[in-house]
Image: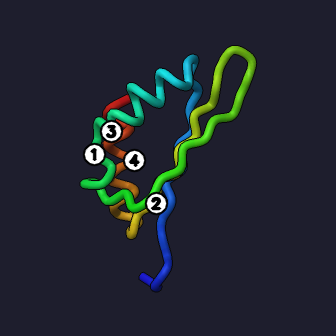
Amino acid sequence: MSEGTVTVLRVEHPVEDFEAWKRDGFDSDPLGREQSGVRRYRVLRATGVGWFTAVVELEFDSRDEAESFSGALTEMW
């Protein structure tokens, strides 16, 4: 891996109540982001009619860590 290179896992999904999703689904950290290799993250939201799109960008040192975390997210959902 080149110095300074990161792998970004970007997740987008619709949520009806963004604040509740962020509090209960993201801030509670059910998968243990730090222990799973997440180095940095960014949480965004895009508005729609009646729904929000939650966007999360997670940075990892390796593709393997990102793929593993992606699989854990899929199992959780």
Q: Secondary structure at mark 3?
A: loop
Whether residue 75 sits left or right of residue 1 in the image: it is left
Instruction: Report the disc number at residue 59.
Output: 2
Whether residue 10 sits left or right of residue 73 in the image: it is right
Spatial CA distance of label 4 from label 2 is 12 Å
Q: Secondary structure at mark 2?
A: strand
Q: Earlier in the sequence, mark 1 or mark 2?
A: 1
Q: Secondary structure at mark 4?
A: helix
Look at 32% across and 32% down and name the residue there: 76
Check whether the beta carbons of the residues at disc 4 and disc 1 lie within 8 A of each other. no
Q: Quadrant of the C terminus?
A: top left
User: Residue 36 at what x, y percent from top left?
Assistant: 28, 54
Q: Amino acid at mark 1?
A: Gly
Check whether the beta carbons of the residues at disc 1 and disc 3 lie within 8 A of each other. yes
Q: Amino acid at mark 3?
A: Asp
Spatial CA distance of label 2 from label 3 is 15 Å
Q: Which residue is mark 3?
A: 29
| Classed neighbour count for the residue bearing mark 1: other residues with Cα under 10 Å, few (<14), some (14–19), many (≥20) | few
Task: Give the mark toward the camera: 4 or 1.
Answer: 1
| Classed neighbour count for the residue bearing mark 4: other residues with Cα under 10 Å, few (<14), some (14–19), many (≥20) | some
Q: Earlier in the sequence, mark 4 or mark 2?
A: 2
User: Residue 1 at what x, y percent from top left?
Assistant: 42, 82
Q: Which residue is mark 4?
A: 70
| Classed neighbour count for the residue bearing mark 2: other residues with Cα under 10 Å, few (<14), some (14–19), many (≥20) | many
Spatial CA distance of label 3 from label 4 is 14 Å
Instruction: Report the disc number at residue 32.
Output: 1
Q: Amino acid at mark 2?
A: Glu
Q: Residue furthest bottom?
A: 2
